[in-house]
Image: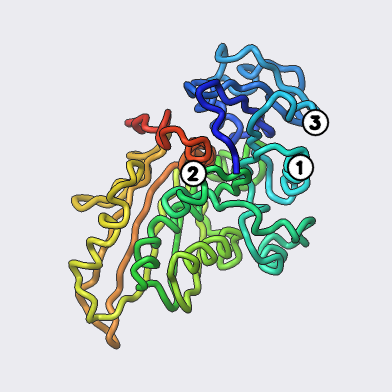
Amino acid sequence: MIDSVLPRPCRVAVVGATGYGGAELLRHLLVHPHVQVTRLIAKDNIGKALGQVHLSLAGLTALRIEDAEPAAVVADADVVFVGLPHKVSALVVARYVDLGAPVIDLSGDYRLLDAAAYKHYYEVDHPLPERLGSFVYGLPELNRKSLRGARYVASPGCFATAITLALLPFAAAGLLNGRVRVAAMTGSSGSGANPVLGTHHPLRAQNLRAYKPLTHQHTPEIEQTLRLAGASDFVLDFVPISAPLVRGILATCWLEVDSEVDIAQISGLAAQYFANDKLVRVLSDRLPEVNAVAGSMYTELAITVDDRVVNGKRTVVAHSAMDNLVKGGAGQAIQSFNVMLGCDEYLGLLTPSQWP
């Protein structure tokens, strides 16, 4: 358990401060009323001011990027956020844990419970399989109680958040079973700050392409979470799609529900499940759009129900839209951080999205 450090400011270090996840963490943490950012850690841009790396953050802190040892970082921090790529993060996180620091990990390295699933989808052996299961999965809409006072949090992936939130009401109602098919489009920022072929602007700006069909590393994370929430005999067929956007995810999820289940009940599941969640908007007058949530913590959800019945089943489509860097990344980590410390879960996170 973590003791709340309130009312004094919580001292926070950000490891991976030069990446897009680091930028999004700092965009929120530097103006958080209960936070003092004490260290900006990275392996690149050493010695530079934060505003030289992330132009939008110029003037918000006098701190500079440094490559400090974990022991020095922990001496100045009550909580450490680690925003490093998967396969890299596991051992770095372990060093901070071994030094006694509460850690929020934004990578996928501690989300799964099964080392075999990690090896299959991440294509490497987990370096510390005995530690899987020691982190709370940081989806507050599902694990709010477990996050209160937690010391170690594995923050969910961007696709995983968008798809899980769309399907969670069905899992909780015992209506999620069989094969569920998902196509989800994502913006280029999800690939990180370092340029690669898939995010090169001339190749992406006017293009749509599928990648990692049925093998994306968020697949077992989504399946694991929804099974724990009540899904049974559930298998996910997931095809991610690269979209010509900087930010945003739009997920379309197809499932089948027994025809005897009332259509009105199906249509109202999401509104009922998320009735007390301020960051989830359940729509009835339109479908979710990325522009409506870009730059914000909000997720938009909607449900479409087919009135046709085939073989005793009717098709249901669950739609979701969110910002992959905010609710799908750093912002959600800060939401979990707020819950961990026992302060207002939504502190600093209710800013409206950009429009247009």
Q: Do the residues labelled 2 and 1 touch (CB within 8 Å)?
A: no
Determine the image quadrant of residue 224: bottom right
Q: Can you give x and y, in whole percent of width and height, for residue 36 in the image?
A: 58, 21
Determine the image quadrant of residue 23: top right
Q: Residue 71 carries which label?
A: 3
Residue name at image x 66 percent, y 54 percent:
134
Label whose residue precedes the other's in the sequence (2 or 1): 1
Residue occupied by mark 1: 92
Q: Can you give x and y, in whole percent of width and height, for residue 15 in the image?
A: 69, 33
Q: In the image, which is nearer the foreground, mark 1 or mark 3?
A: 3
- Between 19 and 177, the residue placed more toward the observer is 177
Secondary structure of residue under mark 1: helix
Residue occupied by mark 2: 324
Q: Do the residues labelled 3 and 2 touch (CB within 8 Å)?
A: no
Residue 158 seen in this snapshot: no
Q: In the image, which is nearer the foreground, mark 2 or mark 1?
A: 1
**Kind of residue indicated by mark 3:** Ala
What is the crowding at mark 2: few (fewer than 14 residues within 10 Å), some, or many (at least 20)?
many
Residue name at image x 27 percent, y 86 percent:
312
Label whose residue precedes the other's in the sequence (3 or 2): 3
Residues at marks 3 and 2, CA–CA distance in whole angstroms = 32 Å
Label whose residue precedes the other's in the sequence (1 or 3): 3
Secondary structure of residue under mark 2: loop
What is the crowding at mark 3: few (fewer than 14 residues within 10 Å), some, or many (at least 20)?
some
Q: Can you give x and y, in whole percent of width and height, for residue 44 in the image?
A: 75, 28
Residues at marks 2 and 1, CA–CA distance in whole angstroms = 24 Å
The quadrant in which the N terminus is found is top right
Residue name at image x 26 percent, y 55 percent:
271
